[in-house]
Each structure stands twice: as structure tokens, then as C-alpha cells.
Amino acid sequence: MKRITLFLISFLASLVWVQAQEAERQCFGNWEANKYSMFIHFGLYSHLGGVWEGEPVRRGYSEQIQSFAGIFSDWYAGTACEFEPVNFDADSIAVLARNAGMRSIVFTSKHHDGFCMYDTETTSYNSTDMLREGRDFVKELSEACGRHGLNFGLYFSLIDWNFPHAYPISSHNADFITKEHHEFNKSQVRELLTGYGRISELWFDMGSLEPWQSQELYDLVKSLQPDCMVSGRLGNDVYDFAVMADNKLPQTALHAPWQSAASMFPETWSYRSWQERGNVADKVAEKLRSLVKVVSHGGNYLLNIGPASDGSIVPFEREVLLQMGKWLETNGKVLYETDASPFAEDFSWGDVTVKGNLMHLILTGTCPGTSYIELPVKGMTLIGSEGARAEMKGGKCVVEVGPEMYSDGTDIKVVTLEFDRPFDRLSSVRPHPQNSWLSWAEAVPHYSYSCFDYYSNYRSTVAYGWDVDIRKPVDEIEVLYTPDEEGREVILEIDDIRMKVLLSSEKLVGTSAEVSMRESRYTGLRGGVFDGPSSWDGVDISSMPVSASMVESPVRPFSNCLMAFGLHASKPGLHMFDVTAGNGVEVVVNGRVQTKHLNPYRTVKKTEKILINLPAGDNQVLVRFYNRFEDRLSCGMEPSAAQDMHYVKVQLPRRLERGRRHVNIYAADKGSVHADCMLHNLRIRL
């Protein structure tokens, strides 16, 4: 009886887990299907239009004019009695979004100034109490979206320049959130998610929350509306979809839900009366290419408009959206209900989306010099093509294009190929031979974006993948790792095999490299963000002050420091180092990034193992130390006193036969799909 009871409990627990996973997939599927949405920045700042006391405020975004123009809070609040958006028509906005080809609208319920564009009980600083003709703009848009078949989402600023218990206005908008302010935010989020129908996404913005604050807000959203997707700017890897920095696209395809938010003009998001708008056709071409790029990489594109003070849509922005809509009327099939490119690499000739057996080639790039596009689709059969002539040659699909098919404007051409079956992962990367050790250096990384907050948002490595050419049947794999990985759980995928592996071994093996440290140099770097591959471009390493291998020094928040190490290896091989850092670290070995990650929240000093494969001769290692919060930094790199690594063999659930196999390895012990997997030290061999 006891055994039956335990079985039932286990079965029910598994059933609940499966249902939860399915619900999460459905939630993401509904949001991901939007592909293209309208962002609206409209608030009290719109009335000023980027002008204060008759002069244009040229510094910063116009929606933050209160901060950049140094306006006293009572003076700023006093402009509400002059704000008369009589031409704000929610239905016409919804119709515009539909005609533009958009599936969703995201509206600013409250921006940094704290002025609420809806009826709230938390403060009288809102559009129903302070405008001459009180209006609830969130309600108007919510109902209009319902009438016109659009999803409706809300932007919500986590900082508030009007709330007395909030941190004061700062230059960076990433202020900490006091406990009183946190409770205030929760109250407003509760109002928004209980009074305005279904909310498809809650677009949190700015502030720097502690992990427990991010988690509480996330849990609150899910308790009120489980299907509401939460944006990455909630921070601390507690969110559903990652968000790029303003007007940014990822360097490569991402492997987790993500969104790119873009303003019509990079200088501002809200209305700016003196904005130089340029040519409509050029702007349409620019935004169309961005839309295609985002969707082909698996993301959603959120394109912003900023209505004028009277609530009307700026004619330039309306025309841009309508012309984009015309292109989508003809070519929408290549974006809507499609999947991202199945190729691991990008192409200079354009972008790729797929749906079922169809592959869409969108010619947004430059014509190849040969006038032929070659696609590695070995094992697939081409059924037909539309838009260009194509044929199979030696495992590749060769598509004939020409300069006449490319345009700098809006006339973006599409070629559609039909194959005999749906697409799996495709790649022109040559498989690695069996019995070779696989590491980060040979892998195709899988990426998302991880962060504490906006300024620490960076491209995180969430998994590694390899193709391996199996020549002899395989029953087990070998794993090599450092003491830091002992006890960790990883997920190993080999084609359709998926297994959880506990890294636990008492067998130790020594490293093989003999290394001497020839020099170490140290400098501070300007710049407060952790993202971007070029943080030290242009830094003259030879002029950096000579220093010891470990440095402790005062440091400003939002800063980076760099150390350069010259290493000489008498023979090629592995060597283990201890790297000490604070909030985050990046290690570059001979020009290639081996690891880049944030440390746990508010880490002051953390030492970790870095296993480096050094070729014989002179090598250079650059280490960037990132400080987001602290006023003192400890940083450095030294050879580990013990050079012993762990070694274990893992039995596979079934034998792998001959053939090309795809291998992925993930972290099973990370609470978020966006957090870095921290598996850069692992070596595996089949």
C-alpha cells in the first residue's frame, strides 16, 4: 500500500510539472507569435515636446526632460493642467497598428516621472485627477485593442521621480528601490493587472532591484495573470524574455525568448517637436530591415511611436508604419507564424525564416560576388522554388540571385524554397573527429541575455554545442572539469538522448602545461556597461602601468578595470588559474573570449578556477573586471596552487552508432534560462 501511495504521489507530481511546462510553452507561444508590436511613449512629458522655457532640451531622451532640464517637481507637475490630449483616439491608434501589420500594443502606464496614465488609488498624480478632462488612457487603449483584435501590454517604470520614498533622480536611472517604493510598485502593478483585462506583457524598465524584489514582482504578476510575459528589465534573471539595450540588436541569434525595442529616432522615444525626421522612405527601409533581422533571429520587434502633445500621431511616424504595412501585406508570410533561421551562422546576403517545409530567404544584405547563394542542407530534397532559380548540388541548395534583386530601399525581395521535410538544425560547420576533447573553443555557443539591471545586461552563454563524427559505436562519454564544477548538475543532449549528469568524481588528473608569468599590467577603463565585445578596443597594453598579479584599489560604481598577463608555455597543454573578481569578469585568451559572466548579486570578492588551453610559446590573457555596485575592487589572476582536475566517465542510456551526432550541454542547476551556464571549464570526449 505504501509503495502504491508513493507511486501515486510521484506520478501526480510529474503530471503537475508536465502541465506547468506545457502552460509555460503556451504562454511563450502566444507572445512570440506577435513578432511585431507597437510601443507608445505618451505621458505628461509629451506636452512639453522636448522644450523647456522656450528652448530645446538637447540632452537625453525627451520623456526624461524633467531630469535633463533640471525642472523642479512642482513646476513639472504644474504642466498637467495645460495638458489637453484631445486628439488621442485609442481606436484610430489600434487601426493604425493593424494596418501597419502589428499584432500588439505596449503602452506607457507610468514613466520615470511617476505620472500615471490611468485611474489609480495610489496617488493623485494621474491623468484622471490632474487633467482638465480626466481620462484613463490605459482603459481606452485596452478596450480599443479588444475591439480590433490586438494584444495589449503595459510599460511600467520601476523608478518614480514623484514618490517621496523613492531614491532621488540620478544620472543613470538605475537607482535602488526602497522597501516603501517596492510596496508602492506592487500596489500599482496589482491595479494594472486586475482592472484592465488581459495584459499580454508587462514591460518593466530601469531601477536596480535586489533579487528578492525582482522575484516578488514576478510572482505577483504570475499570480494575477499567469500568461502575462515579464520583460528582462525586471532584472536579476527573473523574467520571461530578454530585452536588448535601447535600439540594439543581438550580435548573433539567441536561444531564449527575446525582444528588441526600437524608437523611431535614436535621440528620443517620446514626442520631440523639433526632431529632424528626414526622409520617410529611408526610415521605412531602416526599420523594415531591423524587423526582418529580429524575427529571423527568433525575436520580437517592438517599434515605438511618440504621439504629440494633443495626442495625435505624428504624420511622419504614421506614414512610416503604413508603408511598412504595405510591404507586410505582400510579404507577411515570411515573418508571421515562422520560426527563426535554422542555420547556426549569419549570412551577408540576407536573412532566413522557416515554416514547416518552407524556407524564406529575405534579401536584406548585399548580393554575393558570385551571384549565387549556397545553403548547407545535406540530406534534404528540394521540391521547388519561388522568386529565383534553385537546384541541389553536392548537399547544398544553390540559389541564383543577381544585383537586380537587391535594393537599398523598401523593395526587399524574397525567395521561398520548398523541401521534402521540416528543418532541423543546419550548419556548414565541419564535425569534430571522435575521441577529440571538446571545449568552449570548439563549440557553437547558445546565447541569451543576463543582467542585474539595464547597465549590466550582457550576452550570456547558456549552453555549448558541437557536431561530432562518430566512426565507432560509443557507450560512454568522458568529462574533465575543475574543482569548481564538482557537484554541479548538467544536462547532456546527444541527438534525441537527453540526460541529467551529476559531476562527481574522486579521480584526479594533473594539467600538462608548464607556464611562467612574464608580466602583468593593470589599468582602469572608462565605461559603465558590461555588454559589448570592444570594451578595451584602443587600449594600449604596452603603456599600462606594471603591477602585481593581484590588485586592490578604490573603484567607482559602473566601471571596468583591465589586467593584461603575458604567459609563456614551454609546451602546449592545459593550465589552471585562480581569477579573483567582484561583480563580473571577462577572460580573453589570445584574442578569444573564454568566459564572460556576472557573479552572484553584490559579490565583493570571488575567486574561481579558469582552465586555459595554451599553445606553446608566448600567450596573452586579458581579464576585464566589472564593478556595478561597490567602491572597492579586488582583482587578479594567479596560477592555481594545485593543478589537479576531476575526471569521470558517464554511461549513456543507449549505444551511439556511426554517424554525425549533435551534442549540447546545459546547466541543470541554474534557476533561469537566461543565466550564464558557467561551463567554460568542461571538456568532454565521445
Image: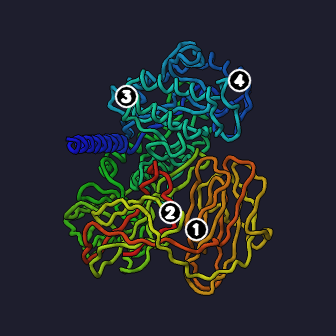
User: In the image, which is nearer the foreground, mark 2 or mark 4?
Assistant: 2
- Between 465 and 31, the one lying in front of the other is 465
- Report how far apart the C-alphas of labels 3 and 1 lie in the structure: 47 Å
- Report how far apart the C-alphas of labels 1 and 4 lie in the structure: 51 Å
| Residue wearing tag 4 | 73
**Circle 1 — which element?**
strand
Name the amino acid, label 1.
Ile
- Check residue 198 in the rendering and tell me which mark sits there, or answer none: 3
The answer to which of marks 4 and 3 sits earlier in the sequence is 4
| Residue wearing tag 1 | 610
For the C terminus, which image quadrant?
bottom left
- Between 4 and 685, the one lying in front of the other is 4
Q: Report x, y in % for residue 522.
A: 75, 66
The colour scheme is: rainbow
Name the amino acid, label 2.
Glu
Mark 2 packing: few (<14 Cα in 10 Å), some, or many (20+)?
Answer: many
The answer to which of marks 2 and 1 sits earlier in the sequence is 2
**Circle 4 — which element?**
helix
Left or right, residue 627 beside residue 220: right
Q: Is residue 475 above or below residue 258?
A: below
